[in-house]
C-alpha cells in the first residue's frame, strides 16, 4: 500500500491544532460552567412551635417524633404536622448563616424538603434555591435575598408547580385543588405571572383566572412602612421605673415591631390600629399574627393572667350596638413545678386561655373564624373598631409582625 507522509503530516497537524483550539476555548468555559453550577447543602432547621411533628429523615426509614428544634435537615426529608405546627428555616451555608427562606407549616400539613442548595463559589450568579413538595395542608413561604445574591423557591403540589422570587406566599392544598396567594413579590405558575396582591387556583394542571387576593383589612401589617398606620402607647405603674421601648427591627428578613422593658413593677407598651370595618355580611373572618417571645419575667401572665409578653385585643360592636372586646395572650415562661398555672385571665370580661409557645421561636397564630368565635353567645361582630397588640408585665422582650385580618374563606 502506498503511503503519503506529507498528507499524514498535514492531517496530524490539523487535528492537533483543532484539539488545541477546542481545549483553549472549551477548557476555561467548562471550568467556568462547573464552578457556576457547583452547589452545596443549605443549613436547614426544623422548629417545633406546637405539639409533636412526624419526620422521615431524607425520606428513608420509619417516621420519628420530633418535639423540639432539630438542625441538619437534609434533602428529601418529609415532615407531617398532624395537630402540631412548625417551621423550616433555611439558611445560607458558611459564616453568614443568613436566612434565605422559611416555610411555616400549619396543622394537617405534609411536605417534602426536596432540595435546599446554594452556590459554592462567590463568582457564581445562581440564586439560593429551595424546592418544596406540598402534598396536603397549608404553608406560608417567605423568600429573602442574602448579601446581594437572589433567592428562589419552587413549590410542587399534586395539581401543578410554581416558581417564586423574593416575597411572601400562601399555598393551600387539598384533594380538589391548590390555592396560592401572593402576599408580596411575584410567582410564575405554568408560564403565567401572578403579581403581588393576586391569587390563583390550580386544578389538575389547569389554572383558573388570576383573581385579586382577599384584601387584608389591616394597613401595614408587615411593618414594611415602619409604624405608619399605627399609634403607639407606653405606660408604667411606678414613675421612677423606666418606660418600655417600641422599635422596628429587621429579623430573618422580616420587619417586626419589638416591645422591650427592663425594670420593676407593672408596665405596658403597645400599638393600635383603627379599623372601623363593617363585617356584618361576612361568613368568615380570621386574624393572623406572627410573634416571637425572647423572654419575660412573670411566669405565664402574672398572678391574674393579665400581664402577657404579647397580648392581642380586638374591640368590636355587636348586633345590638354593644361595644365589646376579645383578648388573646401568649407566654413562654411557665410556672415552676408544683405551682398552679393561672392560664385564665381573671380580669377580662370573658375568661380565655392563654397560649404557651416556645422561647425565641416564631409562632404563627391563626384565630380561626372570628364570626363564629365572637358570636358564640348569639351576638357576632358587626363592626371591627380597632386592634391592639401590646406587651404587659415587669420585664419583657417580644417581636410581632405579619398582622392580617382577612375576610372570606
Image (cartoon, grey):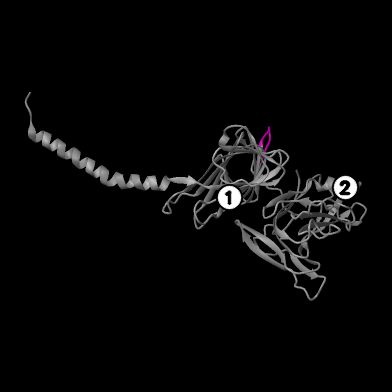
**Mark 2 closeness class: few <14, some 14–19, many ≥20 residues within 10 Å:** some
Q: From this viewpoint, is residue 181 visible?
A: no
Q: From this viewpoint, is residue 396 visible?
A: yes
Would residue 174 be counted in the magenta stretch? yes
Residue nearest the observer in this picture, 246 or 224: 246
Could you tell me which secondary element the residue under label 1 belongs to? strand
Could you tell me which secondary element the residue under label 2 belongs to? loop
97 left or right, relative to 269: left
Q: Is residue 147 above or below residue 127?
A: below
Residue nearest the observer in this picture, 198 or 256: 256
Q: Tell me the magenta residue range.
A: 172-177
**Position of residue 390 measured from the top left corner of the image (x, y, whole percent):** 77, 61
**Position of residue 7 measured from the top left corner of the image (x, y, whole percent):** 10, 34
Q: Main secondary structure of the magenta part?
A: loop
**Position of residue 143 measured from the top left corner of the image (x, y, whole percent):** 58, 50
Say the numbered circle drawn on residue 101. 1
Res 292 quadrant in image = bottom right
Name, please, the residue furthest toward the left: 2
111 left or right, relative to 16: right
Mark 2–mark 1 CB contact (< 8 Å):
no
Say the numbered circle drawn on residue 215. none
Residue nearest the observer in this picture, 114 or 406: 114
Res 263 quadrant in image = bottom right
Marks 2 and 1, the one that precedes in the sequence: 1
**Mark 1 closeness class: few <14, some 14–19, many ≥20 residues within 10 Å:** many
Would residue 319 be counted in the magenta stretch? no
Q: Quadrant of the N terminus?
A: top left
Q: Which residue is mark 2?
A: 375
Q: How many marks?
A: 2
347 left or right, relative to 408: right
Amino acid at each position: 500500500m502506498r503511503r503519503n507522509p506529507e498528507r499524514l503530516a498535514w492531517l496530524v497537524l490539523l487535528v492537533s491544532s483543532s484539539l488545541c483550539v477546542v481545549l483553549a476555548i472549551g477548557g476555561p468555559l467548562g471550568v467556568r460552567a462547573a464552578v457556576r453550577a457547583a452547589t452545596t447543602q443549605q443549613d436547614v432547621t426544623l422548629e417545633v412551635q406546637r405539639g409533636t411533628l412526624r419526620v422521615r429523615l431524607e425520606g428513608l426509614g420509619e417516621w420519628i417524633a420530633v418535639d423540639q428544634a432539630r438542625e441538619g435537615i437534609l434533602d428529601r426529608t418529609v415532615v407531617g404536622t398532624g395537630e402540631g405546627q412548625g417551621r423550616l428555616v433555611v439558611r445560607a451555608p458558611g459564616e453568614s448563616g443568613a436566612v434565605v427562606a422559611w416555610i411555616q407549616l400549619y396543622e394537617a400539613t405534609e411536605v417534602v424538603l426536596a432540595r435546599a442548595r446554594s452556590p459554592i463559589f462567590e463568582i457564581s450568579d445562581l440564586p439560593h434555591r429551595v424546592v418544596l413538595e406540598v402534598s396536603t395542608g397549608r404553608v406560608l413561604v417567605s423568600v429573602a435575598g442574602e448579601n446581594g445574591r437572589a433567592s428562589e423557591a419552587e413549590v410542587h403540589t399534586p395539581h401543578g408547580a410554581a416558581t417564586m422570587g423574593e416575597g411572601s406566599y400562601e399555598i393551600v392544598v387539598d384533594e380538589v385543588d391548590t390555592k396560592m396567594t401572593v402576599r408580596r413579590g411575584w410567582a410564575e405558575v405554568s408560564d403565567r405571572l401572578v403579581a403581588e396582591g393576586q391569587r390563583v387556583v390550580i386544578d389538575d394542571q389547569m389554572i383558573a383566572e388570576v383573581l385579586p387576593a382577599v384584601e387584608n383589612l389591616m394597613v401595614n401589617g408587615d411593618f414594611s412602612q415602619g409604624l405608619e398606620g399605627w399609634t403607639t402607647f407606653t405606660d408604667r405603674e411606678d414613675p421612677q421605673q423606666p418606660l418600655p421601648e417600641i422599635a422596628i427591627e429587621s429579623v430573618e428578613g422580616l420587619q417586626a415591631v419589638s416591645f422591650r422593658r427592663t425594670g420593676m413593677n407593672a408596665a405596658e407598651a403597645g400599638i393600635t390600629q383603627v379599623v372601623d370595618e363593617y363585617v356584618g355580611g361576612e361568613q368568615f373572618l380570621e386574624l393572623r399574627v406572627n410573634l416571637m417571645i425572647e423572654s419575660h419575667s412573670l411566669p405565664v401572665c402574672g398572678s391574674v393572667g393579665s400581664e402577657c409578653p404579647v397580648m392581642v385585643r380586638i374591640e368590636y360592636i355587636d348586633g345590638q350596638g354593644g361595644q365589646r372586646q376579645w383578648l388573646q395572650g401568649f407566654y413562654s415562661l411557665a410556672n415552676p413545678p408544683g405551682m398552679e398555672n393561672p392560664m385564665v385571665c381573671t380580669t377580662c370580661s370573658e375568661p380565655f386561655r392563654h397560649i404557651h409557645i416556645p422561647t425565641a421561636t416564631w409562632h404563627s397564630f391563626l384565630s380561626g373564624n372570628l364570626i363564629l368565635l365572637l358570636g358564640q353567645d348569639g351576638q357576632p361582630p358587626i363592626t371591627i373598631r380597632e386592634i391592639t397588640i401590646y406587651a404587659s408585665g415587669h420585664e419583657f422582650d417580644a417581636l410581632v409582625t405579619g398582622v392580617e385580618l382577612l375576610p372570606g374563606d
